[in-house]
Image (spheres, rainbow, N blue to C red):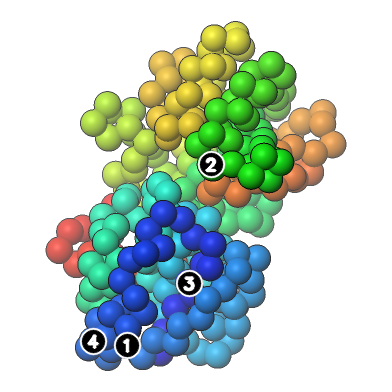
Amino acid sequence: MKALVLLNSTAGTSAGGPPEEIIGKILMASGIEPEFRHVQPQDLQRDTADAVVRKFKLVVASGGDGTISSVASALVGTDVILGILPRGTLNHFAKDLNIPLDLAAAAKVIAEKHVETLDVGEVNDRIFTNNSSLGVYSHLALERESQRKKWRIGKWFALCLASSKMLVRLPLVEVRLKATENARTRRTPVVFVGNNEYQFDPMRVGTRLSLKEGELSLYIANTQSRWGVLRLTVRAIFGRLLQAQDLEASKHTDLWISSRRRSLLVAADGEVVRMQPPLHYRIRPRSLRVCVPASTSAP
């Protein structure tokens, strides 16, 4: 089996993990022939699409959630398998699939060739494997990168600066949400759309038990107070947004979000883009083939 291993040149926290030689030996021992390529983030989708054309059977994404999402977007609906080497800050998708964060162990998962076909979400033709959101997180992420470039500081310090600045502006968004059942208008700091259901259980908060239920989970924050926004901001920083007790939750397969604004900041798997409403969210059931641990059932 031929495999293209795409290594995000700018990816996250564990860049000092096992060298390519060790990963290569693990893959080759199971009959996988890897071709390693260091790639800039903006080239991930292009190189993945090229791998599909070149008849690769497996594409391995080495990076964080943004890297995995970019590679997955070019593999959805194809027979090409996605392998994951988690090298990001949070690695939500890998954790929800029980993929080890140790790169050598993650390579062994790929070598086992146990494949599950999973759901992905989509907003206006943009694929997301974890979630998409409007409001607090999208503004926070954009302002964080602005502060990092302006002051040349680390991610966490930039987050603190971005949070204080964002609270002054109180980024509320007014949207009209329309699903099959009904339509409603909300003014809120957070609209969160997940690929399948996220957990509220304190021991599992922010995780998903299944990626094969064929549904989107929608969460809308009811608070509009400065204190409420502050709590949501802190939870967003530490990946605990869903601990909030004032979230309205529902499940859908198809969802439209419209707004009076000409464009909206939309976060999808940590990447922020500006989109013109209406936003069309939908689930793409069982559309992505992924290597997961054989020893445990994939969610």
Residue farthest toward the front in the current orientation of the protein: 152
**Label 1 with label 3: CB-CB less than 8 Å:** no
In whole angstroms, how far apart are the C-alphas of marks 1 and 4? 6 Å
Q: Which residue is mark 1?
A: 32
Q: Position of residue 15 (x, y in %)?
A: 41, 63
User: Which of the labelled discs sits on residue 30, or is there none?
Assistant: 4
Give the Cα distance between marks 1 and 3: 17 Å
The alpha-carbon separation of the residues under discs 4 and 3 comes to 20 Å
Name the residue located 58 percent from the left edge and 87 percent from the top edge.
Answer: 53
Q: Amino acid at mark 2?
A: Lys
Q: Position of residue 256 (x, y in %)?
A: 66, 39
Rendered view: 216 above or below 62: above
In the rendered image, the quadrant that contains the N terminus is bottom left
- Quadrant in the rendering for residue 18: bottom left
For label 2, the crowd category at 10 Å Cα-Cα, with few meaning under 14, some 14 to 19 and many 20 or more, is few
On residue 138, the disc is none
Q: Tell which tag, 4 or 2, sits nearer the viewer.
A: 2
Give the mark nearer the N terminus: 1 vs 3.
3
Residue 161 percent across, percent down from the top left: 61, 28
Q: Is residue 252 visible?
A: no
- Is the residue under label 2 in contact with that under label 3 (CB below 8 Å)? no
- What element does badge 3 sit on? strand
Crowd around label 3: few <14 · some 14–19 · many ≥20 (10 Å):
many
Q: Which residue is mark 3?
A: 7
Look at the numbered discs 1 and 4 and tell me whether their residues touch, using CB distance below 8 Å. yes
Tag in front: 4 or 3: 3
- Residue type, mark 1 in image: Ile
* Badge nearest the viewer, 2 or 1: 2
The residue at which mark 2 appears reads as 155
Where, by quadrant of the figure, is residue 275 drawn?
A: top right
Query: Could you tell me how far apart the alpha carbons at marks 2 and 1 are, in whole angstroms?
Result: 36 Å
